Amino acid sequence: MRRRTLEDLEFSEILNIIRSYSLSEEGKEYISADRITSDEATIEERAAKIEEIETLLEKAEEKPRSFVSLKNLLEYAERTHAAFDGIDIFLAGDFLVSMMVLSRFLQDESLISDELVQLGKDIDISVSQDGSVKETHPLLLPLFKRAEEARNIRAQYSQNFLSEHYSIVQNQNALYRNERIVLPIKREAKSLVPGYVQGSSQSGGTLFVETFELVEMNNNVVLAEEEIMHMKHRILNDLSLRIRENLWYFRKSISFVRDFDFHYSLCRFIAGTRSRRVKRGSSIKLIGARHPLLFEKAVPISLEVDESCRAVVLSGANAGGKTVTMKTVALFALLVQLCGYAPVEEGSTLPIFDEVYTDIGDGQSILENFSTFSGHMSNIAKILSECTDRSLVLLDEIGSGTDPGEGAALTIGILDYLKKKGAMVFITSHYSQVKMHAYSDDAMLNAGMEFDVDTSRPTYRIIPGLPADSHALAIAKRMGIPREVLSEAKEKLGEGATVSQLINELTGRNRALDRKIAEVESERRNYLRGQSENEKLKRELDRLRHEVKSGSADELRAFMKETRKELERLVKEVSTGTLTREKTLKVKSFIKSIEDESERADREVEAEEEALTEKREYHFEEGMEVYCGAYKRRGILLKNLGKGRWQVSLDSLRMTLKEKDLEPAKVDARPFVAAYRSQSPKPKLVLDLRGCTLKEALEALDTQIEGCLVHSVFSFSIIHGIGNGVLSHGIHAALRKNSNIKEYYFARPEDGGMGKTYVTLA
């Protein structure tokens, strides 16, 4: 990837953010622009590994830990066969512990053998972080115990001697000379104490004597301490030898850790920036793209460029987001070719580019005697010669350092040349000629950065298909340029502002269309919400119906079971012996109980139906035509049978129906057909009423509104001027009273201000 491209896109800052998640120095070094690739298989493989790590992180109780650098240890091992320093041994042990954790995280026991696990544990119990052998080592504990016993014996002897010979000692405290204990004896008593004199006090009155018994005790302490030192060296040498035997493993593991750390760091970066997987395709589609260097301040942008389009012309106010938008597209292309992810929403698509070329910023060079324009042209010349049909080219304000006319012509020439080569091009431009050229070419797309005229601030929203005005005067006003200067500039602008007026008119219509789309979308959401509620009610009704059926079936089964038992008992009783009147009465009584139970169930069902049936106040009388049942068959009422029942004639049939199943029939009437031919003139998109009296203006307005209603025109504008305000007030009063008008509002200052009104019909 070209160095200038990486600098223009500030890609090194992105890499630094990714490196901040790294676990190892080798992983940090591996994260570089060299990893950007155009091989789709490699990109897919990286994305799959990242997704796997993301899954493991979600359910892992123990996260991977950082890995220390073993660079010094490995270099030392190549130079000499001597034992390693204690600190290097500790680092090797720490590395092995990190490998144990990584093995558990990846659920891969093959990452580290039992032998190396034991080596890591042995180093952990043997060596401290400062490289010294821990005194708690099992081999050192008995040695420390013996040394402590020797010291205690020596101390006890010294204390007893000083106590027993208090008359010849200078004081009651033993002293250390050359790491050996000596006794303070008065000079005149030297002959009374057999031993070696190890020195005297400054005055000469005290001699420091090591008695013959004390010599042996001091020697025992020294020997015990030397044994401890020898054991520490032995422990370090043993660990060094075991590390040296496994140097191949450390080299191999460092390579594995580097590869894992590369994907792990990208995974953490993706989570931190809420990135999503980006599909590969021939078109560009960014949804909710957020520049990662802007963090939470980033305004999400959305842009869609069809594969047939080869050039996008970004226009709009300065500091309106043109360059950031262009950089975002290229930066995301590099991120996708690094890991397959970018900070976008689901459904985003980007092509794979073989190279990304940029010409952004000031190309001026004092050393090479380059002006700004010359610097740009030198870089662009290289781009034109090197780019291919798989390249992405970003050009910022071509020709800004020379004559505007020549700069616009040069920009158009470069655009056409790159289009012929098939490269994907993004440029920013303020030139009206370039914007108009993009309009005339189907392979080019105008994209304007929206600007809020009311606040004189950009919104950073991209409006595809429309160029945007530079809004230089509005920005100058916000920056504090005097009003006189702005007025003079506006007058000098003159006819040159026709393109700007066209853009404003298109933007106004686009906003009106956006409002309509928002209204339709709101209605669609309400419809879907109501549909969803109906589905829920239907499911609940089905559930209740099932419960009722299940309950009824259970109740019926229980009733049939009891009835069957009773019937079997009666049959048995009747069949036994002689048929008597008493037996006959029992059978009749049983049949009557079944009929009563059936009538009771019918009454309950009818009562429930009446409770659920919507109450309708219909007056029925004999001879009346009615609709019968769910199919609305037409019939005639013959006779009221009482209790809400009627005898009805249906063609040649006579039926008894309930009153709730009847509905008065509508009287037949001949359909009325009316033909209408409009004489209303076709309405104008702009109604100019300047010079009219208020009466003439209101008559013209009524004609305009009638024409809009007939010809399905939903918006127009009225030019009424400012004047003394009579015309504008009268028109607004008429619009306010007209029920066909949805809204009206004054135009923006640069589009006529209070001298022009936009009208939208309901």
Image (cartoon, grey):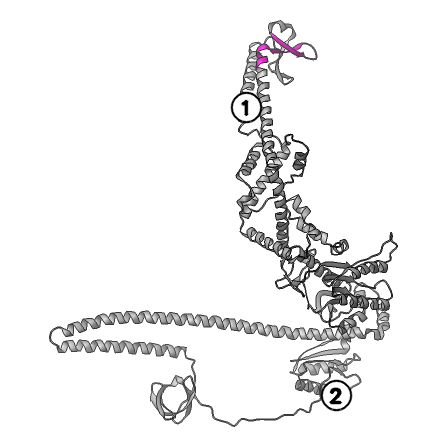
Residue furthest toward the left?
578
Query: Which corner quadrant holds the C terminus?
Result: bottom right
Residue furthest to the right in view is 369
Residue 556 picture location, percent across and down: 30, 72
**Pick the front one: 523 or 261:** 261
Magenta highlight on residue 205: yes
Place of residue 81 in the rendered image (x, y in percent of width and height, measured from the top left): 65, 31
Question: Could you say where residue 141 lies in the image, as x and y percent from the top left?
Answer: 53, 26
402, above or below 751, in the image: above
In the rendered image, which quarter is residue 341 located in?
bottom right
Nearer to the camera, 59 or 203: 59
**For the residues marked 1 and 2, what is the alpha-carbon distance in whole angstroms?**
118 Å
Q: What is the secondary structure assignment of the residue under circle 2?
A: helix
Q: Is residue 90 left or right of residue 682?
A: left
Q: Is residue 276 above or below residue 23?
A: below
Residue 761 in sight here: yes
Residue 164 occupies which quadrant of the picture? top right
x and y percentages locating residue 311 in the rendered image: 74, 67
Amino acid type, callout 1: Leu
**Residue found 73% across the figure and 58% down from its top:** 355
| Residue that label 1 marks | 143
Q: Nearer the viewer, residue 353 or 339?
A: 353
Instruction: Count residues near mark 2 (Cα–Cα under 10 Å), then give few for <14, some for 14-19, many for 20+.
Output: few
Amino acid type at mark 2: Lys
Task: Using the image, tell me which numbered label, if any, was put on residue 42.
Answer: none
The residue identified by callout 2 is 695
Q: Which residues are magenta?
A: 194-216
Q: Is residue 316 visible?
A: no
Q: Secondary structure at mark 1?
A: helix
